[in-house]
């Protein structure tokens, strides 16, 4: 690369610029307020984890292993940028002693996740998630609670037109027998499946059900459905979740093809997509139960259920739906000092800052040009400061809309701006 070439962002990541942050903040604030209303507490876990934590819970998946940002740090430790939050939150739940407190722990997390995927629209290598996790209870009421919380978040973000898909994938007791049936069903069809599905047939047959490739679709309808093969406990749990969703008037579609490819996922799985969406690419979020995850990490077996929502897609959809968040101006008040009045201007700004957001235009340009800038950023007031005014500790206050300019003592500015 030529020396003079300017340095750009890493491939697949992007900046969220100030103009877009208002919308993002609305989605984040909706997340925080919804989580808090349901009694969830915030947790922040590191972006880097031991690669082994992710490897242990990601074995066998096509995605996590292939897409993991992994590297050796300067001490030769193998670390990874987290591709999702749950593994780290469960680790923190034990390391931080949350398992010793009244159960379940209700936790939420907002932050960036990293996947080394092929970048494309709506798919980034750094993206942001809102995660909720209820750890330490196997009650079906929590499955329903997490789904209700996720749905309310989207409604509060202005996204009302969404669909909820739900399924149960059983547990270690009933799933193995079901997987045998599924393999038996698919084996005679193997040569007609696409390459990756042929490999999945013996290794991870559940994933045959969520394959999106055209040639694999015709065989799904007649495939055995796991909800017909649940053990008594899983069946009772599933019925209870659906009853709770009905009671909460939450609409859902039973989707027998919604699965998770890992053993530690148990029972409930769900996904939320915009109405009218086609592919998985459009999913706004998903979640489910992971009763086997803690043990997979080497901790005592502990049930949990959670949700991960994608802020990149949620904000994109909010914008597409015409969700108008008028960004507040960077400063409501701009101080416009004459030359050589930096100290006085900073003083006046400090006074005004007690009631308003304030910036100072220190640039060496004409008053006209400064007024234009203040107007462009959407300031509501300007405070003109000349040397003579400054000596008397007064300034000229002007409301951009009104035009009237009045002399105000510095000490009276907060009262006039309030
Ligand atoms: P997952 O953890 O794969 O179930 O993803 C949960 C949500 O995170 C998805 O529904 C997406 O909204 C979002 N998401 C996942 N991967 C990406 C990505 N590479 N870029 C942007 N958003 C993503």
Image: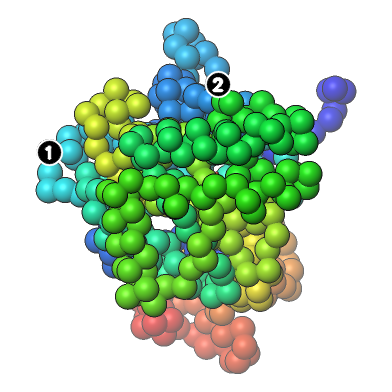
Q: Of 293 and 349, which appears nearest the observer? A: 293
How far across and down, in percent of the image, does residue 326 sit? Answer: 59, 75
Residue at far right of view = 2
How far across and down, in percent of the image, does residue 278 sit? Answer: 70, 60
Q: Is residue 160 left or right of residue 109?
A: right
Q: Is residue 54 left or right of residue 283?
A: left
Tell me what residue is drawn at x 49 percent, y 85 percent. Answer: 407
Q: Is residue 376 left or right of residue 343?
A: right
Count of marks placed on residues: 2
Instruction: Give the quarter of the figure containing the C terminus.
Output: bottom left
Q: Is residue 131 visible?
A: no
Q: What residue sits right under mark 2 in the picture? A: 70
Tell me what residue is drawn at x 41 percent, y 85 percent. Answer: 416
Q: Of 305 and 414, which appears nearest the observer? A: 305
Q: Of 400 and 131, which appears nearest the observer? A: 131
Instruction: Specify whether tag 1 is near ligand 1 (CB below 8 Å).
Output: no
- N-terminal label among 1 and 2: 2
Which secondary structure, mark 1? helix
Measure the C-alpha gap from mark 1 to mark 2.
32 Å
Q: Which mark is residue 39?
A: none
How far across and down, in percent of the image, does residue 228 sit? Answer: 44, 52
Q: Quadrant of residue 37?
A: bottom left
Q: What residue sits right under mark 1 in the picture? A: 100
Using the image, determine if residue 61 lies above or below residue 398: above
Q: Quadrant of residue 195?
A: top right
Name the image colouring: rainbow
Instruction: Give the quarter of the figure containing the N terminus.
Output: top right
Which secondary structure, mark 2? strand
Q: Is residue 137 visible?
A: yes
Tell me what residue is drawn at x 52 percent, y 81 percent. Answer: 397
Using the image, determine if residue 166 lies above or below residue 155: above
């Amino acid at each position: 690369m030529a020396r003079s070439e300017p340095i750009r962002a890493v491939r697949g990541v992007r900046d969220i610029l100030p103009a877009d942050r208002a919308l993002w903040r609305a989605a984040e604030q909706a997340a925080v307020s919804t989580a808090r209303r349901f009694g969830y507490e915030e947790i922040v876990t590191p972006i880097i984890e031991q690669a082994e934590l992710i490897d242990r819970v990601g074995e066998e998946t096509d995605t996590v292993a292939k897409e993991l940002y992994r590297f050796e740090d300067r001490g030769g430790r193998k670390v990874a940028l987290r591709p999702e939050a749950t593994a780290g939150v469960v680790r923190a739940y034990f390391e931080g002693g949350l398992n010793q407190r009244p159960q379940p722990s209700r936790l939420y997390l907002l932050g960036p996740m990293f996947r080394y995927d092929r970048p494309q629209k709506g798919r980034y290598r750094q993206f942001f998630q809102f995660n909720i996790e209820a750890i330490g209870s196997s009650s079906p009421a929590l499955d329903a609670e997490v789904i209700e919380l996720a749905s309310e978040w989207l409604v509060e973000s202005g996204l009302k037109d969404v669909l909820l898909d739900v399924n149960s994938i059983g547990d270690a007791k009933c799933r193995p027998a079901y997987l045998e049936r599924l393999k038996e069903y698919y084996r005679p069809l193997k040569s007609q499946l696409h390459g990756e599905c042929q490999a999945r047939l013996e290794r991870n047959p559940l994933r045959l059900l969520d394959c999106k490739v055209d040639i694999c679709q015709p065989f799904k309808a007649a495939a055995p459905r796991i909800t017909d093969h649940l053990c008594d406990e899983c069946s009772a749990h599933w019925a209870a979740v659906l009853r709770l969703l009905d009671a909460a008037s939450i609409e859902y579609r039973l989707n027998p093809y919604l699965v998770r490819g890992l053993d530690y996922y148990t029972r409930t799985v769900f996904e939320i997509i915009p109405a009218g969406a086609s592919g998985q690419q459009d999913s706004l979020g998903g979640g489910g139960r992971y009763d086997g995850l803690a043990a997979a990490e080497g901790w005592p077996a502990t049930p949990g259920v959670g949700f991960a929502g994608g802020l990149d897609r949620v904000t994109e959809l909010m914008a597409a739906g015409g969700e108008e968040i008028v960004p507040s101006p960077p400063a409501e008040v701009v101080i416009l000092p004459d030359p050589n009045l930096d100290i006085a201007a900073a003083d006046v700004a400090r006074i005004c800052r007690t009631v308003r957001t304030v910036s100072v235009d220190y640039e060496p340009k004409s008053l006209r040009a400064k007024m234009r800038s203040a107007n462009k950023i959407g300031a509501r007031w300007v405070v003109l400061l000349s040397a003579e005014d400054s000596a008397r500790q007064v300034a000229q206050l002007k409301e951009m809309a009104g035009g009237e300019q009045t002399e105000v003592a510095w000490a009276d500015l907060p009262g006039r701006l309030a």
